[in-house]
């Protein structure tokens, strides 16, 4: 493969996309005001499709993870040139501002590995990855292969695993064991920047173009190799805390109004109770027969 020439002034972040003929990525870069470069790695058969809709472009056939591994082996400077790299599937609907904000939150909170939450109407495998409206982000022990976001250091630690699975199953349980996460606050799902996963699980080009792949066998082999086979799977993708969203001003005002209303009600009840007690004290006792 010929070497790619990096942009003269690379942005801070990079999106590497394995794109097919139905890719939705044009909406990701509709706005020029963005903090990421887009590398399209096209796997279809139409010559130069998307070349004009990318900052970097190449074409190669094959499944997502081995092809990204080959690309990074050929061009390790891609990892060195960017602070964070996102590796999404091509069937995610999201706008430019949301992707840029995802990167900003990733850096602001010192994350090593993350993913955007999925909108509630998305096709999904794990319900805990759906957007939680009460959180900015939630800390997890897992991110899915659909849209993982790596820091430079995490990419260096994890990229060799990309060679080891054609479909990607099992990679998402291995990556958290390889990164530096001493306080449990370096892996997160970012609720404030949700993406819409538009196609059914298992129905994309990755599965159609690799009918002989055995995802379950790949997953078992990977988990055994990296000592993850005894992992409590459910515990990995449940969240253990996070950063809650600040209540909007209107909600604060509403809560204050409700507290004031309740206080007035309590005062009225107290007044009525005292009035009843006064009336009872002032009423003469009935004479004894």
Image: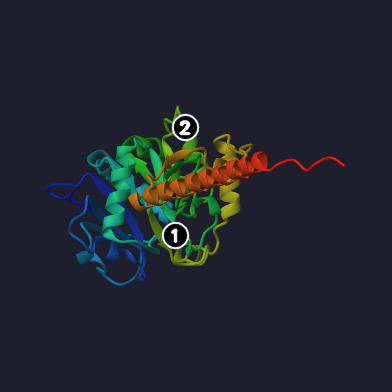
Mark 2 vs mark 1, CA separation in Å: 25 Å
Rendering coords of residue 240 (x, y %): 52, 38
Instruction: Give the residue at the far left of this rendering.
Output: 8
Work out whether 36 lies above or below 25: above
On residue 184, the disc is 2
211 displayed left or right of 9: right
Inspect this view and state whether residue 222 appears: no
Q: Which residue is drawn at 36% across and 40% down?
A: 155
Q: Residue at x 27, y 40 (%)?
A: 83
Quadrant that contains the C terminus: top right
225 displayed left or right of 289: left
On residue 119, the disc is 1
Instruction: Give the residue at the far top of this rendering.
Output: 182
On residue 219, the disc is none
Inspect this view and state whether residue 117 appears: yes
Quadrant location of residue 275?
top right
260 displayed left or right of 77: right
Q: Which secondary structure, mark 2?
A: loop
Say which of 95 and 88 sits in front.
95
**Structural crowding at the residue carrying mark 2, measured as other residues with C-alpha within 10 Å and reported as few (<14), some (14–19) or many (≥20):** few
């Amino acid at each position: 493969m010929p070497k790619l020439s990096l942009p003269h002034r690379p942005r801070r972040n990079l999106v590497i996309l394995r794109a097919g003929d139905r890719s939705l990525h044009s909406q990701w870069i509709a706005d020029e005001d963005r903090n990421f470069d887009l590398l399209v790695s096209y796997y279809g058969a139409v010559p130069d499709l998307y070349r004009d809709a990318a900052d970097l472009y190449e074409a190669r056939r094959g499944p997502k993870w081995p092809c990204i591994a080959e690309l990074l082996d050929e061009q390790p400077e891609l990892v060195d040139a960017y602070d964070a790299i996102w590796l999404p599937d091509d069937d995610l609907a999201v706008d430019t501002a949301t992707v840029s904000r995802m990167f900003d939150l990733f850096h602001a909170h010192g994350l090593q590995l993350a993913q955007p939450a999925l909108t509630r109407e998305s096709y999904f495998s794990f319900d805990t990855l759906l957007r939680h409206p009460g959180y900015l982000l939630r800390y997890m022990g897992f991110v899915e292969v659909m849209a993982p976001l790596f820091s430079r250091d995490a990419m260096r630690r994890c990229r060799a695993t990309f060679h080891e699975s054609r479909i990607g199953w099992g990679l998402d349980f291995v990556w958290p064991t390889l990164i530096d996460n001493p306080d449990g606050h370096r892996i997160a799902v970012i609720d404030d920047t949700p993406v819409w996963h538009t196609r059914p699980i298992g129905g994309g080009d990755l599965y159609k173009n690799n009918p002989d792949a055995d995802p379950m066998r790949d997953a078992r082999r990977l988990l055994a190799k990296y000592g993850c086979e005894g992992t409590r799977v459910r515990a990995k993708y449940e969240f253990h805390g996070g950063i809650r969203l600040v209540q909007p001003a209107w909600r604060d005002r509403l809560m204050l109004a409700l507290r004031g209303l309740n206080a007035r009600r309590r005062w009225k009840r107290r007044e009525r109770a005292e009035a009843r007690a006064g009336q009872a004290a002032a009423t003469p006792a009935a004479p004894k027969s």
